[in-house]
Image (tube, helix red, strand yellow):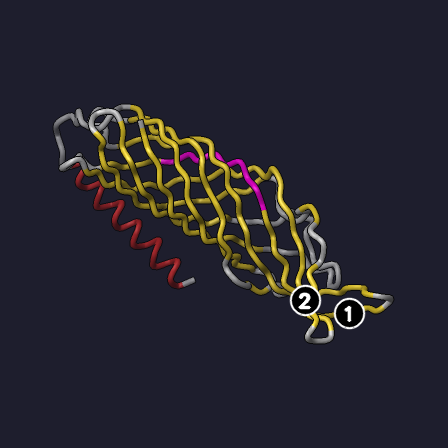
């Protein structure tokens, strides 16, 4: 958690530096275009941060994010942009808790690990700051919100039954994730111009999903409601036109 806070602070400082550089320019920037359309794809590292006594964070998992992006200039210097688009996000995460299982007429109360797999359609809305191009290179800082709409996913449990037997339950539809979840994001990017028509780019972003579970998600053994945030690091590559 301390590393995440340090990372966010560092990104905020870098974004402030970019903004200062932009404000020092008094001439219009004709090298940055007023509108960019992009396609991006990348991997994510996601981990739960539970704030419920009955839950413990388990291993971080690899996910996916990709889709189309749209940046629209908000000032004549073409430094400040409104950023949006439509993304597909696949999020995975694990949580540990004590649960009850029934096997061959036997009731077992054991520590278990539940894996959640969730697919979202995500609409980002935010602000992106771009530096003036220098030798075909542009640096950017961004912040905003992800509006996540669940479109599918699964969940399943793992637990030990009289060692050394390791049991995985059948995958079922993800019934615990909320249908809508809000996230905040902040990030840094690098762009390289390919002539006057296209740019390739790479971003590293941090996002915090404020909540994951719906109101009905709970531990059926203890009756305790599940509550958790989700932290994510994104490494994304793409091309803009």
Quadrant of the frame with the C terminus:
top left
Residue 232 counted in the magenta span: no
Would residue 86 be found to the left or right of residue 83 on screen?
Answer: right
* Residue 124 drawn in magenta: yes
Please determine whether, in this image, residue 157 is positioned above or below residue 125: below
Residue 40's x, y, as percent? 39, 36
Residue extending farthest bottom: 163
Q: Judge left or right: residue 215 versus residue 6.
A: right
Quarter of the image for residue 96 reads bottom right
The majority secondary structure of the magenta stretch comes to strand
At 77% across and 64% down in the image, what residue appears? 101
Q: In the structure shown, which secondary structural element does the residue marked by tag 2 occupy?
A: strand
Task: Determine the residue positioned at 35% across, 53% down.
Answer: 8
Q: Give coordinates of residue 70: x percent, y percent.
A: 37, 28
Please indicate whether residue 217 sits to the left or right of residue 188 in the image: right
Do the numbered discs 1 and 2 sit on residues whose CB atoms are within 8 Å?
yes
Residue farthest front in this picture:
164
Which residues are the magenta region?
118-126
Residue topped by disc 1: 108
How far across and how far down the image is residue 6, in percent?
A: 34, 59
The 10 Å Cα crowd at callout 1, few under 14, some 14 to 19, many 20 or more, is: few
Say which residue appears at 64% left-offset and 56% top-offset.
Answer: 226
Q: For numbered disc 1, what is the local secondary structure?
A: strand
Residue tagged 2: 159
């Amino acid at each position: 958690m301390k590393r995440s806070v340090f990372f966010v602070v560092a990104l905020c400082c870098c974004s402030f530096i970019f903004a200062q550089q932009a404000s020092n320019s008094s001439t219009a920037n004709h090298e940055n275009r007023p509108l960019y359309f992009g396609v991006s794809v990348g991997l994510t590292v996601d981990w739960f941060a539970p704030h419920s006594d009955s839950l413990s964070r388990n291993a971080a998992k690899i996910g996916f994010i990709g889709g189309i992006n749209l940046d629209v200039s908000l000032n004549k210097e073409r430094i400040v942009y409104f950023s949006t688009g439509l993304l597909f996000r696949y999020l995975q995460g694990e949580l540990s808790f004590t649960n009850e299982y029934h096997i061959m007429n036997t009731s077992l109360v054991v520590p278990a690990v539940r894996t959640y797999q969730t697919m979202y359609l995500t609409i980002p809305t935010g602000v992106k700051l771009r530096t003036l191009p220098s030798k075909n290179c542009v640096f950017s800082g961004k912040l905003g919100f992800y509006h996540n709409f669940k479109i599918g996913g699964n969940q399943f449990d793992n637990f030990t039954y009289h060692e050394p037997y390791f049991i995985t339950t059948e995958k079922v539809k993800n019934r615990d994730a909320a249908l809508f979840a809000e996230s905040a994001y902040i990030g840094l990017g690098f762009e390289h111009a390919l002539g006057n028509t296209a740019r390739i780019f790479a971003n590293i972003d941090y996002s915090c999903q404020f909540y994951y579970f719906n109101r009905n998600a709970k531990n059926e053994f203890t009756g305790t409601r599940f509550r958790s945030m989700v932290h994510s690091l994104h490494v994304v590559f793409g091309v803009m036109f």
